Amino acid sequence: MKQRREASGLTLDQIQQTTKIQKRYIIAIEEGDYKNLPGSFYARAFIKTYAESLGLDVDELYETYAKDLPKIEPQPTAQLSRKQTYSKASETSSRVSRWVPKVMLVLVAFLLMTAVWYVVRSLDFGGQDASPNEAPSSGVSINQNEEVPEEEPAEEAPVEEEPVEEELVEETGPIAVTETNGADLTYEIATDERLTTEIHVKESPATYVGVRDTSLEGPFLAPEYPNQSKQNPIVIEDAETDTLRIRIGLIGGVEKIVVNGRELELADSPVTQNIFVKRVDAE
């Protein structure tokens, strides 16, 4: 990793700014001095982030240097003693016991107020009759046997609907990310044609680029290290798959990615990105 960093012209300060790893930990990783790192778990995490920022394949790195890398040690689980458990239970019980009298006091007060309200309503103030007063007669008598004719609803004039012309809007402009899952970015393009992809790679900084059909196990559709060949841009014409997987080690080393004439909106990230381009049927 030190050789790759120096070959890319990157300083320790630049790596620290990109990966947010302290410089002393970066030096310890390059010298293999893992005892100066904060534990084996963080050591492997720092190594992964550092390798991805250089555009290296982390899986291949772990497999090649498995014997040299620090092993993840199991973390001891903290268990509460019987005294601590009893103390927590007692504290919870004391809290409940403090609230119970207050709740009972509020409940009793509510019941007393309700009883007083019913007693006051039942009292007869001023000797009023229990029966309600009859409403004054208006002098108009209504024969309940007569039928009231129903009004016929007015006919509404038919409304002519104007024909709506459907406009076909062709999608243009850059393709935005439709789904993000960690380092996996998914783009969708609506087209009835096969996918034709162009990957424009910069000369510096160097980056890892690999193109497969759908997954990590699929066949390669382009060279793994295009910056070491004369093929730029990398072109995959009429791919016989509905999903392309483009793995980028360092996104800063890629100028742009164009699919069927439309450019992808690339997300700036110091770690490795897995870009999935899916073809969906155009409606």
Image (cartoon, rainbow, N blue to C red):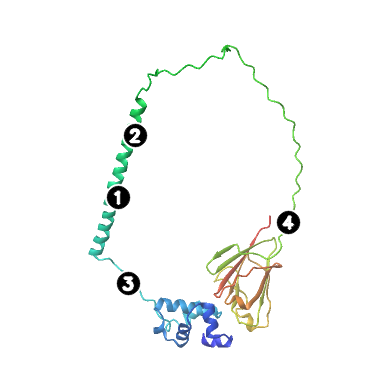
Which residue matches tag 2? 114
Q: Which badge, 1 or 2, comes first in the chain's sequence?
A: 1
Determine whether 101 is above or below 192 in the image.
Answer: above
Q: In the picture provided, is 259 more to the left or to the right than 217?
A: right
Distance, label 1 to label 4, CA atoms, is 65 Å
Q: Which badge, 3 or 2, comes first in the chain's sequence?
A: 3
The image quadrant of residue 257 is bottom right
Distance, label 1 to label 2, CA atoms, is 23 Å
Give, as a three-letter code, the residue at label 1.
Trp
Distance, label 2 to label 4, CA atoms, is 68 Å
Q: Which badge, 1 or 4, comes first in the chain's sequence?
A: 1
Which residue matches tag 4? 169
Q: Secondary structure at mark 2?
A: helix
Distance, label 3 to label 2, CA atoms, is 59 Å
Which residue matches tag 3? 76
Distance, label 3 to label 1, CA atoms, is 38 Å
Q: Which badge, 3 or 4, comes first in the chain's sequence?
A: 3
Give, as a three-letter code, the residue at label 3.
Pro
Task: Pick the residue in front: 71 or 235.
Answer: 71
Give, as a three-letter code, the residue at label 2.
Thr
Q: Secondary structure at mark 1?
A: helix
Circle 4 Cα neighbour tier, 10 Å, few/some/many (<14 / 14–19 / ≥20): few
Give, as a three-letter code, the residue at label 4.
Val
Could you tell me residue 102's position as x and y percent?
Answer: 30, 47
Task: Pick the residue in front: 181 or 189.
Answer: 181
